[in-house]
């Protein structure tokens, strides 16, 4: 994930954006898991970044630049770092959500994306612009 973070920072520098310590800290806390705003705020406070307005502004900035992704699960916003992967970008991503604990699991399976794309392109009058899918799941009961 570190390489992915460095790629985004490099792209932002090339566009002329300032890369502040608070922006780097925000991306670092989002690099490994999906977090709510409150969780982000708590993790950044541990690193010494407590300005709530700056956190909101940086989240908005990274959303506009498609560096982070927002998911709406059970009416709660979760944020995550987008991945430099055709199947998981700000525009394309598939997640499983465990209904028991709201744990979010990434699905980066080319066959699933290809299957959805093929179906739409071959069996409808549409072409795919993006794929965003959230699937609610429960653990299988064992016998």
Image (spheres, grey):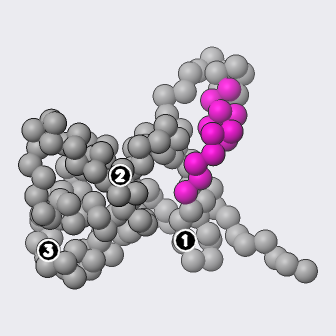
Q: Which residue is mark 1?
A: 103
Q: Are marks 3 and 1 in contact (CB under 8 Å)?
A: no
Give the structural element (helix, strand or loop) at label 1: loop
Classify the position of the N terminus by image quarter: bottom left
Q: Name the residue located 10 percent from the left edge and 58 percent from the top edge.
A: 20
Residue 95's image quarter?
bottom right
Give the structural element (helix, strand or loop) at label 3: loop
Position of 73 compared to 135: left or right?
A: left
Q: Position of residue 89 (x, y in %)?
A: 43, 43
Label number found at residue 49: 3
Circle 2 crowding by C-alpha within 10 Å: few under 14, some 14–19, many from 20: few
Residue 31's image quarter?
bottom left
Residue 127 in sight from this viewpoint: yes
Label number found at residue 3: 2
Residue 64 in sight from this viewpoint: no
**Distance CA(mark 3)–CA(mark 1):** 26 Å
Earlier residue among tags 1 and 2:
2
Label number found at residue 71: none
Q: Are marks 1 and 2 in contact (CB under 8 Å)?
A: no
Position of 75 compared to 117: left or right?
A: left
Give the extent of the magenta segment: 106-118
Q: Is residue 55 above or below residue 92?
A: below
Q: Position of residue 62 (x, y in %)?
A: 24, 50
Classify the position of the C terminus by image quarter: bottom right
């Amino acid at each position: 994930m570190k390489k992915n973070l460095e790629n985004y920072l490099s792209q932002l520098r090339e566009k002329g954006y300032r890369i502040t310590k608070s922006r780097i800290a925000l991306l670092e806390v989002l690099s490994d898991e999906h977090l709510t705003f409150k969780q982000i705020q708590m993790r950044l406070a541990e690193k010494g970044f407590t300005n709530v307005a700056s956190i909101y502004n940086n989240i908005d900035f990274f959303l506009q630049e498609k560096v982070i992704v927002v998911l709406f699960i059970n009416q709660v916003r979760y944020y995550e770092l987008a991945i430099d992967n055709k199947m998981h970008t700000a525009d394309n991503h598939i997640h499983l959500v465990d209904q028991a604990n709201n744990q979010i699991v990434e699905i980066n399976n080319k066959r699933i994306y290809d299957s959805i794309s093929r179906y739409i392109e071959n069996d409808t009058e549409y072409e795919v612009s993006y794929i965003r899918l959230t699937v609610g799941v429960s653990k299988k009961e064992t016998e």
